Image (cartoon, rainbow, N blue to C red):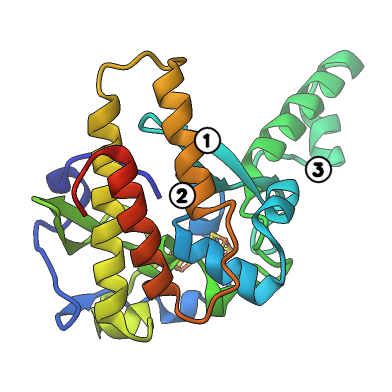
Amino acid sequence: MWREETVEELSDGRFYTANDLVKIGTDDCKGCSDCCRMGPVIVLDPLDVFELNRFLGQSFEELLNETIELKVIDGLILPVLKLVQKADPEKAPAGVPDQKMLQENTADHSDRVSAQENAQEGAQEEAMACPYLGEDGRCTIHDFRPGICRLYPLGRSWENGDFRYILQVNECTRCNGTKIKVKKWLGIPNLAAYEAFCRDWHELLASARRLLEGADPESKLRNQICIYLLRQFYLCDWNVDDFYGVFAQRRAEAMRYLGFSS
Ligand code: SF4
Ligand code: SF4
Protein backbone atom coordinates (compact mmCIF):
# COMPACT_ATOMS: atom_id res chain seq x y z
CA MET A 1 0.00 0.00 0.00
CA TRP A 2 1.34 3.35 -1.00
CA ARG A 3 1.87 5.87 1.77
CA GLU A 4 3.19 9.38 1.83
CA GLU A 5 3.16 10.02 5.59
CA THR A 6 6.36 10.23 7.60
CA VAL A 7 7.56 7.34 9.79
CA GLU A 8 6.79 9.40 12.90
CA GLU A 9 3.17 9.88 11.81
CA LEU A 10 2.71 6.22 10.87
CA SER A 11 4.59 4.10 13.35
CA ASP A 12 5.43 3.42 16.96
CA GLY A 13 8.79 5.07 16.29
CA ARG A 14 10.72 1.79 16.32
CA PHE A 15 12.51 -0.02 13.52
CA TYR A 16 12.48 -3.81 13.26
CA THR A 17 14.46 -6.51 11.46
CA ALA A 18 13.10 -9.89 10.37
CA ASN A 19 14.31 -11.46 13.64
CA ASP A 20 12.63 -8.95 15.94
CA LEU A 21 9.46 -9.51 17.89
CA VAL A 22 6.73 -6.99 17.20
CA LYS A 23 3.33 -6.46 18.84
CA ILE A 24 1.31 -7.41 15.82
CA GLY A 25 -1.05 -10.32 16.57
CA THR A 26 -4.52 -9.94 15.05
CA ASP A 27 -6.06 -13.09 16.51
CA ASP A 28 -6.48 -14.53 12.99
CA CYS A 29 -8.50 -11.41 12.07
CA LYS A 30 -11.71 -13.14 13.30
CA GLY A 31 -13.92 -12.18 10.36
CA CYS A 32 -12.48 -8.68 10.01
CA SER A 33 -11.53 -7.66 6.47
CA ASP A 34 -11.10 -3.93 6.99
CA CYS A 35 -7.68 -3.70 5.42
CA CYS A 36 -8.93 -5.40 2.24
CA ARG A 37 -11.63 -2.75 1.79
CA MET A 38 -11.22 0.77 0.49
CA GLY A 39 -7.61 0.82 1.61
CA PRO A 40 -4.72 2.60 0.02
CA VAL A 41 -3.52 1.36 -3.36
CA ILE A 42 -1.92 -2.10 -3.34
CA VAL A 43 0.90 -1.88 -5.84
CA LEU A 44 2.09 -5.19 -7.29
CA ASP A 45 5.76 -5.93 -7.78
CA PRO A 46 7.11 -8.51 -10.28
CA LEU A 47 7.12 -11.27 -7.64
CA ASP A 48 3.44 -10.65 -6.89
CA VAL A 49 2.63 -11.01 -10.59
CA PHE A 50 4.85 -14.11 -10.88
CA GLU A 51 2.88 -15.69 -7.99
CA LEU A 52 -0.50 -14.74 -9.47
CA ASN A 53 0.58 -16.13 -12.88
CA ARG A 54 1.77 -19.35 -11.24
CA PHE A 55 -1.10 -20.08 -8.89
CA LEU A 56 -4.03 -18.72 -10.90
CA GLY A 57 -2.68 -19.82 -14.30
CA GLN A 58 -3.45 -16.35 -15.68
CA SER A 59 -1.14 -14.19 -17.75
CA PHE A 60 -0.58 -10.52 -16.93
CA GLU A 61 -2.91 -9.57 -19.80
CA GLU A 62 -5.64 -11.85 -18.41
CA LEU A 63 -5.20 -10.36 -14.93
CA LEU A 64 -5.48 -6.88 -16.47
CA ASN A 65 -8.88 -7.86 -17.85
CA GLU A 66 -10.11 -8.95 -14.45
CA THR A 67 -8.45 -8.05 -11.18
CA ILE A 68 -5.68 -5.56 -11.76
CA GLU A 69 -5.30 -2.20 -13.46
CA LEU A 70 -2.48 0.18 -14.31
CA LYS A 71 -2.00 3.40 -12.36
CA VAL A 72 0.55 6.16 -12.30
CA ILE A 73 2.40 5.76 -9.00
CA ASP A 74 4.90 8.50 -8.31
CA GLY A 75 5.50 9.08 -12.01
CA LEU A 76 5.76 5.43 -13.12
CA ILE A 77 3.00 3.21 -14.51
CA LEU A 78 2.58 0.17 -12.27
CA PRO A 79 -0.08 -2.52 -11.75
CA VAL A 80 -2.38 -2.31 -8.72
CA LEU A 81 -5.25 -4.43 -7.45
CA LYS A 82 -8.52 -3.12 -8.91
CA LEU A 83 -11.14 -2.42 -6.24
CA VAL A 84 -14.62 -3.83 -6.89
CA GLN A 85 -17.94 -3.50 -5.10
CA LYS A 86 -18.47 -6.16 -2.47
CA ALA A 87 -20.70 -6.58 0.56
CA ASP A 88 -19.13 -6.87 4.00
CA PRO A 89 -20.58 -9.97 5.70
CA GLU A 90 -19.60 -8.65 9.11
CA LYS A 91 -21.50 -5.38 8.84
CA ALA A 92 -24.93 -4.27 7.71
CA PRO A 93 -24.31 -1.85 4.85
CA ALA A 94 -23.20 1.26 6.68
CA GLY A 95 -25.51 4.24 6.22
CA VAL A 96 -28.43 2.26 4.75
CA PRO A 97 -31.46 2.56 7.02
CA ASP A 98 -34.15 -0.05 6.44
CA GLN A 99 -37.47 0.78 4.73
CA LYS A 100 -39.41 1.06 8.02
CA MET A 101 -36.94 3.51 9.46
CA LEU A 102 -37.07 5.61 6.31
CA GLN A 103 -40.88 5.70 6.38
CA GLU A 104 -40.92 6.77 10.02
CA ASN A 105 -38.24 9.41 9.68
CA THR A 106 -38.92 11.13 6.40
CA ALA A 107 -41.58 13.73 5.79
CA ASP A 108 -42.84 12.72 2.39
CA HIS A 109 -42.22 10.34 -0.47
CA SER A 110 -39.72 12.56 -2.29
CA ASP A 111 -37.63 12.92 0.88
CA ARG A 112 -37.80 9.18 1.41
CA VAL A 113 -36.59 8.37 -2.13
CA SER A 114 -33.87 10.95 -1.86
CA ALA A 115 -32.70 9.68 1.55
CA GLN A 116 -32.73 6.12 0.30
CA GLU A 117 -30.79 6.99 -2.85
CA ASN A 118 -28.20 8.89 -0.84
CA ALA A 119 -27.87 6.03 1.62
CA GLN A 120 -27.45 3.53 -1.19
CA GLU A 121 -24.83 5.70 -2.83
CA GLY A 122 -22.97 5.86 0.49
CA ALA A 123 -23.21 2.10 0.92
CA GLN A 124 -21.85 1.54 -2.57
CA GLU A 125 -18.88 3.74 -1.82
CA GLU A 126 -18.21 1.88 1.37
CA ALA A 127 -18.48 -1.52 -0.31
CA MET A 128 -15.37 -1.20 -2.46
CA ALA A 129 -13.00 -4.08 -1.78
CA CYS A 130 -10.12 -6.11 -3.16
CA PRO A 131 -11.23 -8.42 -6.00
CA TYR A 132 -9.65 -11.36 -4.17
CA LEU A 133 -11.68 -10.88 -1.01
CA GLY A 134 -14.06 -13.83 -0.63
CA GLU A 135 -17.72 -13.59 0.33
CA ASP A 136 -16.78 -14.92 3.76
CA GLY A 137 -14.46 -11.96 4.29
CA ARG A 138 -11.30 -14.07 3.86
CA CYS A 139 -8.57 -13.70 1.26
CA THR A 140 -9.06 -16.21 -1.56
CA ILE A 141 -5.38 -16.06 -2.53
CA HIS A 142 -3.99 -16.11 1.00
CA ASP A 143 -1.08 -18.48 0.26
CA PHE A 144 0.19 -16.32 -2.59
CA ARG A 145 -1.14 -12.90 -1.61
CA PRO A 146 0.92 -9.82 -2.58
CA GLY A 147 3.92 -8.83 -0.48
CA ILE A 148 2.19 -5.67 0.78
CA CYS A 149 -0.67 -7.78 2.13
CA ARG A 150 1.80 -10.12 3.86
CA LEU A 151 3.44 -7.15 5.53
CA TYR A 152 0.30 -5.42 6.76
CA PRO A 153 0.11 -3.75 9.28
CA LEU A 154 3.89 -3.67 9.05
CA GLY A 155 5.44 -1.36 6.51
CA ARG A 156 8.93 -0.66 5.23
CA SER A 157 10.93 2.48 5.96
CA TRP A 158 13.61 3.17 3.35
CA GLU A 159 16.91 4.95 3.84
CA ASN A 160 19.98 4.89 1.58
CA GLY A 161 18.67 1.97 -0.48
CA ASP A 162 17.97 -0.24 2.53
CA PHE A 163 14.87 -0.75 4.62
CA ARG A 164 13.72 -1.66 8.08
CA TYR A 165 10.28 -2.80 9.09
CA ILE A 166 7.94 -0.45 10.95
CA LEU A 167 4.65 -1.09 12.72
CA GLN A 168 1.89 1.14 11.32
CA VAL A 169 0.04 1.87 14.52
CA ASN A 170 -3.05 3.54 13.06
CA GLU A 171 -3.88 0.79 10.57
CA CYS A 172 -5.14 -2.55 11.88
CA THR A 173 -8.32 -2.13 13.85
CA ARG A 174 -7.80 -5.30 15.86
CA CYS A 175 -4.12 -5.70 16.64
CA ASN A 176 -4.18 -7.21 20.10
CA GLY A 177 -0.52 -6.69 20.84
CA THR A 178 0.56 -10.33 20.85
CA LYS A 179 4.26 -10.44 20.02
CA ILE A 180 5.24 -12.26 16.85
CA LYS A 181 8.56 -12.43 15.01
CA VAL A 182 8.53 -10.38 11.82
CA LYS A 183 9.79 -13.30 9.72
CA LYS A 184 7.04 -15.56 11.07
CA TRP A 185 4.44 -12.91 10.29
CA LEU A 186 5.69 -12.61 6.71
CA GLY A 187 5.85 -16.39 6.20
CA ILE A 188 8.03 -16.01 3.12
CA PRO A 189 10.39 -18.89 2.23
CA ASN A 190 13.98 -17.78 1.59
CA LEU A 191 13.42 -14.42 3.26
CA ALA A 192 17.00 -13.25 2.62
CA ALA A 193 16.49 -13.64 -1.16
CA TYR A 194 13.11 -11.89 -0.90
CA GLU A 195 14.55 -8.96 1.03
CA ALA A 196 17.39 -8.65 -1.52
CA PHE A 197 14.76 -8.63 -4.28
CA CYS A 198 12.84 -5.84 -2.46
CA ARG A 199 16.01 -3.72 -2.26
CA ASP A 200 16.90 -4.33 -5.91
CA TRP A 201 13.38 -3.56 -7.14
CA HIS A 202 13.19 -0.44 -4.98
CA GLU A 203 16.57 0.76 -6.28
CA LEU A 204 15.53 0.17 -9.89
CA LEU A 205 12.30 2.15 -9.48
CA ALA A 206 14.16 4.91 -7.61
CA SER A 207 16.72 5.08 -10.44
CA ALA A 208 13.96 5.34 -13.05
CA ARG A 209 12.23 8.07 -11.04
CA ARG A 210 15.50 10.01 -10.69
CA LEU A 211 15.99 9.80 -14.43
CA LEU A 212 12.50 11.20 -15.00
CA GLU A 213 12.72 13.97 -12.43
CA GLY A 214 11.41 17.15 -14.03
CA ALA A 215 10.28 15.34 -17.21
CA ASP A 216 6.85 16.26 -18.53
CA PRO A 217 4.16 13.72 -17.48
CA GLU A 218 3.35 13.23 -21.19
CA SER A 219 6.95 13.24 -22.40
CA LYS A 220 8.22 10.66 -24.86
CA LEU A 221 11.01 9.67 -22.44
CA ARG A 222 8.54 8.97 -19.62
CA ASN A 223 6.32 6.86 -21.89
CA GLN A 224 9.32 4.99 -23.23
CA ILE A 225 10.65 4.12 -19.77
CA CYS A 226 7.23 3.20 -18.36
CA ILE A 227 6.49 0.89 -21.29
CA TYR A 228 9.96 -0.65 -21.07
CA LEU A 229 9.54 -1.44 -17.36
CA LEU A 230 6.08 -2.93 -17.93
CA ARG A 231 7.42 -5.14 -20.74
CA GLN A 232 10.59 -6.13 -18.91
CA PHE A 233 8.96 -7.04 -15.58
CA TYR A 234 5.22 -7.61 -16.08
CA LEU A 235 4.27 -8.24 -19.69
CA CYS A 236 6.87 -10.96 -19.89
CA ASP A 237 6.96 -14.72 -19.50
CA TRP A 238 7.20 -15.48 -15.78
CA ASN A 239 6.82 -19.19 -16.35
CA VAL A 240 10.23 -19.81 -14.81
CA ASP A 241 11.49 -21.95 -11.92
CA ASP A 242 14.07 -19.55 -10.50
CA PHE A 243 12.22 -16.24 -10.05
CA TYR A 244 15.02 -14.47 -8.19
CA GLY A 245 17.69 -15.55 -10.72
CA VAL A 246 15.62 -14.45 -13.72
CA PHE A 247 14.62 -11.22 -12.00
CA ALA A 248 18.30 -10.40 -11.29
CA GLN A 249 19.12 -10.93 -14.96
CA ARG A 250 16.21 -8.75 -16.15
CA ARG A 251 17.07 -6.08 -13.60
CA ALA A 252 20.71 -5.95 -14.77
CA GLU A 253 19.45 -5.47 -18.35
CA ALA A 254 17.07 -2.73 -17.16
CA MET A 255 19.79 -0.88 -15.24
CA ARG A 256 21.94 -0.90 -18.39
CA TYR A 257 18.96 0.27 -20.46
CA LEU A 258 18.41 3.17 -18.05
CA GLY A 259 22.11 4.04 -18.19
CA PHE A 260 22.95 2.92 -14.66
CA SER A 261 25.56 0.33 -13.76
CA SER A 262 23.96 -2.78 -12.22
S1 SF4 B 1 -5.04 -9.92 -1.85
FE1 SF4 B 1 -6.05 -10.85 -0.09
S2 SF4 B 1 -5.06 -9.91 1.70
FE2 SF4 B 1 -4.56 -8.64 -0.07
S3 SF4 B 1 -6.13 -7.02 -0.08
FE3 SF4 B 1 -6.84 -8.69 -1.40
S4 SF4 B 1 -8.12 -9.98 -0.11
FE4 SF4 B 1 -6.89 -8.68 1.23
S1 SF4 C 1 -7.52 -4.69 9.84
FE1 SF4 C 1 -6.23 -6.05 11.12
S2 SF4 C 1 -7.67 -7.55 11.97
FE2 SF4 C 1 -8.72 -6.55 10.25
S3 SF4 C 1 -8.26 -7.90 8.48
FE3 SF4 C 1 -6.69 -6.32 8.50
S4 SF4 C 1 -4.97 -7.23 9.67
FE4 SF4 C 1 -6.82 -8.44 10.12
Residue 177 placement (x, y as % from top left): 26, 75
Q: Which residue is mark 1?
A: 71
Kindly identify the residue that appears in the image at 14 percent across and 80 percent down. 20
Few, some or many C-alpha atoms within 10 Å of disc 2 (few <14, some 14-19, many ≥20)? many
* Disc assigned to residue 98: 3
Residue 213 placement (x, y as % from top left): 25, 23
Describe residue 249's horizontal placement relative to residue 125 as left or right: left
Describe the element under mark 1 as helix, strand or loop: strand
Residue placed most toward the observer, 251 or 140: 251
Describe residue 185's horizontal placement relative to residue 157 as left or right: right
Residue 171 at least partly seen? no
* Front: mark 2 or 3: 2
135 to 79, vertically: above or below? below
Describe the element under mark 3 as helix, strand or loop: loop
167 to 56, vertically: above or below? above
Q: Amino acid at mark 3?
A: Asp
Give yes or no for contact between labels 2 and 3 (Cβ–Cβ under 8 Å).
Answer: no
Q: Which quadrant holds residue 92? A: bottom right
201 to 127, vertically: above or below? below
Q: Amino acid at mark 2?
A: Val
Mark earlier in primary sequence (1, 2)? 2
Residue 249 placement (x, y as % from top left): 36, 64
Mark earlier in primary sequence (1, 3)? 1
Q: Which residue is mark 2?
A: 43
Mark earlier in primary sequence (2, 3)? 2
Residue furthest out toward the right = 109
Q: Amino acid at mark 1?
A: Lys
